[in-house]
Image (spheres, rainbow, N blue to C red):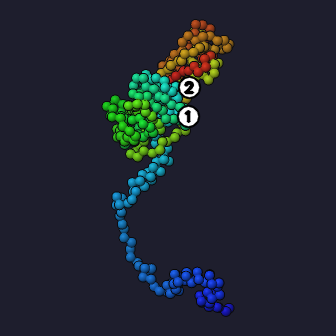
Amino acid sequence: MTKFLVSYDDVAQSLPPIVKAKLDATYAAVGDLAAKVATTDPRLSDARTPVAHTQAASTITDFNAATNALILAAAVVSAGRNRIINGDFRINQRAYASAATLAVGAYSFDRWKSTTAATSLTFTAAPQGQTVTINSGGSVAQIIERANIGAGTFTLSWAGTATARVYNVGSGAPAYAASPITVTLNGLADVTVEFTATGGAKTVGGVQIESGTTPTPFELIPVGVSLSSCQRYFWRKSSPTADHLIATGVATSSTGARAWVDLPVQMRAVPTFVLSAGTWNMITAAFATVAATAITIETGYTSVIHAVLACTTASGLVAGNATFVHTTTLGAYFDFAAEL
């Protein structure tokens, strides 16, 4: 096999002038590659051991911003960090109407109650939740169950112009402040998160309290999960039609019956019971309708997972026969509450 050695000059002479000019410029910039490779470059044989170096955080530009960004990114994927229930005001089992006046202790949206007289919340309902406007001088609070918030440092954050405060139930309340608020809790009591509007109407939405000192974006909870969390404290079983069998039971006499209702989730405590206005009846085993004169809760038989109701009529029942609690009022309801 014959080998041919061709120099750069030989190749360059055969190129068009414009190509040769560009190639000459490149060759001049690079230099003699063969000479560079053949020559020992002392940098390639430097066998010094690398020296460890510590850089002070204060000398790194945007160190805090970069660190917070990393913390934020990690926290965003941490499900269940928000200890507030219904912080986006999506769940409204009591059908609270915008701008309705609340007495002290009365609930509006699930888990949110008034803490001053004549409080009202104005809002435009949306499936994803919404910001609410508290009237001037009004205030609302949520009591967080001790089981859901232990000892440690927590940060409360929200969107809007309302001010807030966080404190143990039974302890002295601190001053109100703007978002965010960082507090240290001892885990020995339920915790109050309270918002107020001073100097005019104020807004609040996206309420979140989480472990740590850095507030993160509001955690959007699936609506079904949020509803179940609310039902631990309150459940409204309502009639979707004007002809509805709302509970089943058995007659204990010609004038009395017991009916039972399975609760959708385990409630915080044995619930109290409220019966709405409306027309209430008992349906006999023969499908006759007799008016119910009273429906009350049997506290001795009711538990955190089911309720037993004592139903009374003037007559018409047969002991031992099945019966049903019936209403002809659209929207009539049973309320079961185990609020804090």
One can see residue 141 in this view: no
Residue 336: image tag: none
Q: Residue at x 68, y 13 (%)?
A: 286
Where residue 315 sits, quadrant-wise, is top right
Nearest the camera: 14 or 125?
14
Give the distance between the C-alpha atoms of the residues marked 1 and 2, in whole angstroms.
30 Å
Q: Is residue 42 above or below residue 120?
A: below
Amino acid type shown at disc 1:
Ala
One can see residue 173 in this view: yes
Q: Earlier in the sequence, mark 1 or mark 2?
A: 1
Nearest the camera: 59 or 143?
59
Q: Residue at x 46, y 42 (%)?
A: 81
Locate the C terminus by quadrant: top left
Q: Is residue 312 above or below residue 118?
A: above
Nearest the camera: 25 or 81?
25
Return the x and y of residue 115 as percentages of the image width and height: 40, 26
Q: Is residue 282 above or below residue 66?
A: above
Q: How many marks?
A: 2
Residue 262: image tag: 2
Return the x and y of residue 95 as percentages of the image width and height: 53, 26
- Say whether residue 42 is left or right of residue 221: left
Q: Residue at x 57, y 84 (%)?
A: 24
Where residue 42 sits, quadrant-wise, is bottom left
Name the residue carrying label 1. 126
Front: mark 1 or 2: 1
Return the x and y of residue 258 as percentages of the image width and height: 56, 16
Return the x and y of residue 108 as percentages of the image width and height: 48, 27
Locate the N terminus by quadrant: bottom right
Q: Residues within 10 Å of mark 1 (few under 14, many from 20)?
A: few
Amino acid type shown at disc 2:
Asp
**Disc 1 secondary structure class:** loop
